[in-house]
Amino acid sequence: MLNDEVREKLIQTAVEARKWAYAPYSSYKVGAAVLTASGRVYDGVNVENAAYPTTMCAERVAVFKAVSQGEQSFEAIAVASVNGGMPCGACRQVLSEFGLDTTVLVVNDQGEIVHQATVGDLLPGAFRPQDIVRES
Ligand SMILES: [Zn+2]
């Protein structure tokens, strides 16, 4: 599924999405693009806010867009920033909800891969859905 052509398209979508980033406070523009098992791609950007903690990362915007369209199985996600910054812990946790095998492609603003890993690589010991045990 993630052949060279698809990988490149995913990366370019993430890079191009950066132009929509709303980052007036940090000026750190991030774009993301998630590839679903059905072959669709959903992009996302970071959306900052004057009340800083309410800011949302590009990765989670992309995942939430996909989930809100009925997608819950992800092949890969590309994350683009000027320097290829890594996904934060919260985004790693959100990605882990939908599987540890999702490929994470971290790229710079030229689309060059700076880091490649799986979600499981990035979040060892993730708290998973099966970890919730209901007590009666
Ligand atoms: Zn994040």
Image (cartoon, grey):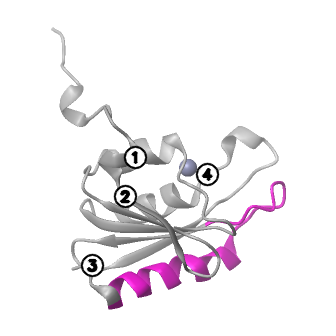
Residue 78 placement (x, y as % from top left):
46, 69
User: In which quarter of the view is residue 6 placed?
Assistant: bottom left
| Marks 4 & 3, CB-CB < 8 Å contact | no
Upstream in sequence: badge 1 or badge 4: 4
Q: Quadrant of the C terminus?
A: top left
Q: Position of residue 73 (x, y in %)?
A: 24, 62
Instruction: Give, as a single range, the part of the protein colored magenta.
Output: 5-30
Residue drawn at x 30%, y 46% as measured from the top left: 120
Relative to 50, does residue 130 appear above or below in the rendering? above
Q: Name the residue beneath numbered marker 2.
A: 117
Q: CA distance from mark 4 to mark 2?
A: 22 Å
Label located before the other in sequence (1 or 3): 3
Q: Nearer the viewer, mark 1 or mark 4?
A: 1
**Label 4 vs 2, first from the N-terminus:** 4
Q: SS for tag 4?
A: loop
Q: Is residue 59 magenta?
A: no
